Image (tube, rainbow, N blue to C red):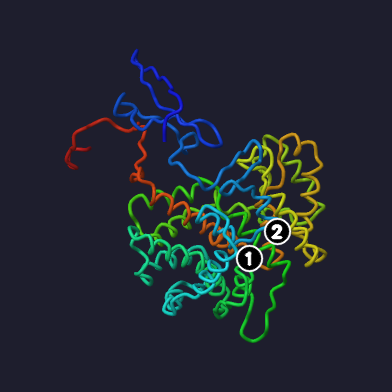
Amino acid sequence: MTPTKTARLTIDDKTYDLPMYSPTLGPDVVDIGKLYAQADVFTFDPGFTSTAACDSTITYIDGDKGELLYRGYPIEQLAEQSHHLEVCYLLLYGELPTKTQLVDFEARVTRHTMVHEQMHYFFRGFRRDSHPMATMVGVVGAMSAFYHDSTDIADPWQREVAAIRMIAKLPTIAAMAYKYSVGQPFVYPKNSLSYAGNFLHMCFAVPCEEYVVNPILEKAMDRIMMLHADHEQNASTSTVRLAGSSGANPFACIAAGIACLWGPAHGGANQACLEMLREIGTVDRIPEFIARAKDKNDPFRLMGFGHRVYKNFDPRAKVMKESADEVLGLLGVENNPTLQVAKELERIALEDDYFISKKLYPNVDFYSGIILDAMGFPTSMFTPIFALSRTVGWISQWKEMIADKNQKIGRPRQLYIGATQRDYTAVATRG
């Protein structure tokens, strides 16, 4: 890239000129890559919230405008007109596929959905009450032990095979983790079903009776996957890139991303939202919790409202609301107090001046949580579904990083505030 202008930094009467770059979208970036060598200082940015760790062409977010673009395409347009596997192609290769390319891509993914049969024994090594995310971290990391022919990151074809394998197999692995956790037999994938429909079938079918995938639930699951496919340089994506910068194999990198996503501050938001709805319990208790949310002295806060990045509204939530309305219309909320609470809380948030003034609109986690609950998924499966949805984003970011000629192994610096150098003393003299 060619610098577009220069930033001037003065330290102790010395001036340093730092190159600046202008992106196609978003704020300008100051390049501090040589600041330490020139001025012997580091920058301090906990959480890296003001630091660009890479350049990327994949996803763009404007939190103030409530805008999310996959390769330049607004998420609303993709959710309305596209489907998850087409979006996977877009994220992986940068352009929407032709009809022939899409058919070929879908066929390649579909024919890689089965996992190595010996991996069944690997599942049985976990306790029967293991959290599905714990199982997924282990199994995905172990894929490098089963698929030796796609771990050479220097080989473009092996990178391609690894990408297809993970996109294809993560739903199977997540479904197997779910089946194992509830004591049911594994269900093999069916090539005749769509990506989302196949996942639902593997989760809810049993050998003793036929399971027919409902098209409304299939569409809702496809949208959940699509809306969570990528989200710029979040914690788990940054983890995948950092792990990949060391040269680790792709399966290990994705396992690292899954481990990071498991954190409740990242991937557990929709689970936390549903647990809050269950804590409220019934519609008549909502005013009590609304009052607590408005009380500055009360630590309680409503989960699933507002977003750290989106300061106005979450564009994914608008799309997810449509699916939530369709799913709840199909399954009903009459006999489900949790979903009754969700619908009333949504109504209040969209009408109450307090929520409107603070822009605390329902976010994507609010709607995805109630959809997954209505479908019959336990909360322990919410984050695994997030992980299988985000896999294509992680892989796309990993492939982009590998191809970047300027990529270096990640090595953040620190502001050291510990003890200065001191001499060791023998234990007998320490008093």
Question: Badge 1: how crowded within 10 Å, few (<14), some, or many (20+)?
Answer: few
Per the image, label 2 sits on a secondary structure element best described as helix
- Above or below, 209 against 348 in this view is below
- Above or below, 12 against 272 in this view is above
Q: Nearer the viewer, residue 313 or 94?
A: 94
Residue 289 in the image, given as x and y percentages of width and height:
74, 46
Q: Which residue position holds label 2?
A: 370
Q: Which residue position holds label 1?
A: 378
Q: Which-is-in-front pick, marks 2 and 1?
A: 2
What type is the residue that disc 1 sits on?
Pro
Identify the residue shown where x is 44% and y is 58%. Answer: 254
**Sequence order check: which comes first, mark 2 or mark 1?**
2
Assign the N terminus to one quadrant of the image. Answer: top left
Per the image, label 1 sits on a secondary structure element best described as loop
Residue 120 in the image, given as x and y percentages of width and height:
46, 78
Assign the C terminus to one quadrant of the image. Answer: top left
- Above or below, 44 against 302 in this view is above
- Above or below, 3 against 228 in this view is above
290 left or right, relative to 161: right
